[in-house]
Image (cartoon, grey):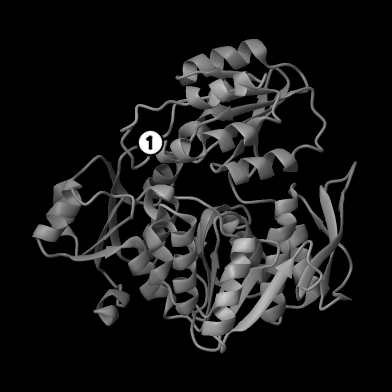
Amino acid sequence: MEEYILDNSDKKFHLIGIGGISMSAIAQMLKDEGNIVTGSDKSESKQVKILEEKGIDVTIGHDISKVRDADIVIYTAAIPEDDEELVEARKLEKDIYERAEYLGILIRQYKNSIGVAGTHGKTTTTSMISNIFLKAGINPTIQVGALLKELNSNYNIGDNEHFIFESCEYKDSFLNFYPTSTVITNIDEDHMEYFKTLENILISFKKYIMNIQRNGKIYINLDDENSKEVLEYASYNREDLEKVTFSIENDAAEYQARDIEYVENSEYILKFTPYKNGNKMGNEIHLKISGKVNIANAIAAIAVADKNNIEYMYIKKGLEEFTGASRRFEYKGMVNEAKIYDDYAHHPTEIKALSEGISHIPANRKIAIFEPHTYSRVINHKEDFAKSLSNFDIIIATKIYASREVNKHNITSEEITNILKDNGKNAIYLDTNEKIKEYIKKEAKQGDIIVTIGAGDVTKIGDIIKD
């Protein structure tokens, strides 16, 4: 069967949930290889428009006839089992693969497969590694969870040797992958509607490292306690693996970022010097993206590149010319002479990192427009969300983006704004884009910074409110 699906010439693929960032990359890769590709998604999006421009037939809603015509059906983990297209595919006994299962088969075809796992920072770290490889003249196959600006795409079909990809833990998707090496950026409580406890998350990460191919590598963040637990597990259960450590704060790490400084009056925002085993690797590196968390992502990328024998000049070039992945504090435009940015942060840890990362940027006021992502995250983290948003001068909370969930607890974003108000913060709940536009047009002033925050539809608000 594996040989059958890898022989991709002239096959008909139908992708359910095709508008997702990873699914859209798979769709384009299949199309580029000469296949007929169709798909469906619940709503229009930027990714859907990109697919349609490339000649991929996308249905908004369902189209059973496309399933009937397909040789292979691929669906994303967010699709429920009672989805009518998936039910039809099973009834017709089509060859059906969950997204991660199909991606896992592709990954096994590469000599050097580098997975980037972790709760936060996967997309940026994957993008940094990819950019370094590209600057070094290596042409890897890439799959990343955002548009990589250097490629203007979320994928690249490269040579048959290197595959750099995001390795997501949601619903244990990454247990379908058997990479030659993997990065673990950090481990935090997320997707709790699935995992229930932190211990279950750690169990999944431990299972994942058992999937790494023999004599492979694991890159671990020594600044993260949960990742260190996985490292300890690997030390006892995978003696064959090379354990590569990276850090900002821990001198015991093999790779460390030191001399970290914010740069004023420059095209760059941060600078640091990388060290290996206590020795300076080369001249300081400047970054065009903000936040201490991105230094951690950069030192992880440096470790991977160095272990792949990439010269320091290309490491430096790849990082210094990296302008960030899409939706990572991405500039969108102006309103009332206030700058608008958009960020994908949707977990309290990520919002805190965003807030800290922009704290050095001069502004009259910093205004957050926050769309919580899933009811379960609000239930589990409402206090943490409020705390992570508290450094903004004004906080606007929108309706919760449901994604795959049902609102069983009748919860709204007002639970977050009420906590903020109780702590003396200027917070308001606005449940429509029109109300947000009206508020911003009236409130925004010269010198303000406005950030739309979340993983759902909030990304559209920047275009709605800008002049």
Q: Position of residue 17 (x, y in %)?
A: 32, 49
* Residue at figure coordinates x 49%, y 79% from the top left: 212
- Looking at the rendering, which quadrant does residue 379 occupy? top left
Location of residue 302 with respect to 77 vertically, above or below: below
Q: Residue furthest left?
A: 91
* Residue at figure coordinates x 53%, y 37% from the top left: 454
* Residue at figure coordinates x 37%, y 37% from the top left: 44
Q: Position of residue 351 (x, y in %)?
A: 62, 40
Which residue is denoted by mark 1 in the rendering?
A: 402
- Looking at the rendering, which quadrant does residue 350 occupy? top right
Q: Is residue 168 visible?
A: no
Q: Position of residue 338 (x, y in %)?
A: 71, 23
Q: Quadrant of the N terminus?
A: bottom left
Location of residue 63 with respect to 89 vertically, above or below: above
SS at mark 1? Answer: loop
* Residue at figure coordinates x 79%, y 22% from the top left: 364
Q: In the image, 354: left or right of 65?
A: right
Residues 2 and 51: in front is: 2
Q: Position of residue 234 (x, y in %)?
A: 56, 79
